[in-house]
Amino acid sequence: MVDPITAIAAATAAFNGVKKLVQAGREIEDVTGQLGKWFTAVSDFNHSKDEVENPSNMKKFMSPKSVEQEALDIIIHKKKVQEMEAELATMIKWRYGGTVYEDMIRMRRKLRAQREKAVYAKLRRRKQIRDTIIGLSVAAIGLYLTWLIADTALKMYEENIHQKKNLL
């Protein structure tokens, strides 16, 4: 799982690559690799943003950032993604024509749905399994400690009774 900061850094690097290629007058075939990297990074950002907005129980307790800081980071990065996408749309429409961009957006929606089902569903399952294992481990340790305390208390009680019988 990629964190939002890393995803934004990757998106910015890919965006700058697309910008340089378009400005250099390269053909759309030469630009698609960088565009693909940009869309992948944006997709990773959107998914990690959803993870931050809907954290697991473990993440809620262990997050090093304040809620306000996470919210501000997400809003600022989301705005940056929107600005990059608007600039990319303008560059692509200007250089290659509006239909190329519109076709790409339609295809992106289709591929995003497929990717969500395949990649992110698998990641969610792994995360749920990990959280379940951690929760069960904590519960098992708690039960063991409870048993240990109860056993010690019972032994102390039995020794106390035994000592009282010896005194009588």
Image: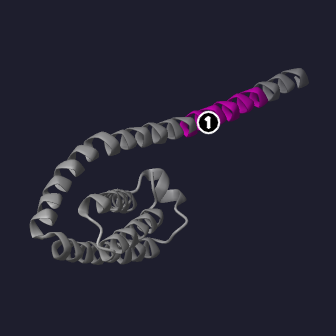
Amino acid bearing label 1: Ile
Q: How many marks?
A: 1
Q: Where, by quadrant of the figure, is residue 29 drawn?
A: bottom left
Report x, y in % for residue 1: 45, 51
Magenta span main SS: helix
Q: Is residue 149 left or right of residue 40?
A: right
Residue 89 placement: quadrant:
bottom left
26 or 56, nearer to the observer: 26
141 is within the stretch colored magenta: yes
Which residue is at 20% across, 74% downward? 95
Q: Where's residue 72, x and y in %?
A: 40, 77
Residue range (magenta): 138-157
State whether residue 155 appears in this view: yes
Question: Vertical placement of 2 versus 158: above or below?
Answer: below
The residue that appears at 75% across and 29% down in the rendered structure is: 157
Could you say which is closer to the camera, residue 96 or residue 165? 96
The answer to whether residue 165 is above or below residue 1 is above
Name the quarter where the C terminus is drawn. top right
In this rendering, the answer to whether 101 lies above or below 112 is: below
Residue extending farthest to the right is 167
What SS does tag 1 mark?
helix
The residue pinned by badge 1 equals 141
- Residue 13 image point, x, y percent: 43, 68
For mark 1, does the 10 Å Cα neighbourhood hold few (<14), some (14 to 19), or many (20 or more) residues?
A: few
At 14% across and 63% down in the image, what residue appears? 100
In this image, 37 relative to 111: left or right?
right
The answer to whether one can see residue 35 in this image is no
Magenta region includes residue 14 = no
Specify whether 121 is left or right of 58: left
Measuring from the top left, give residue 37's x and y in whole percent: 36, 58
Kindly identify the residue that appears in the image at 54 percent across and 37 percent down: 139
Q: In terms of depth relative to the viewer, which is nearer, 99 or 87?
A: 99
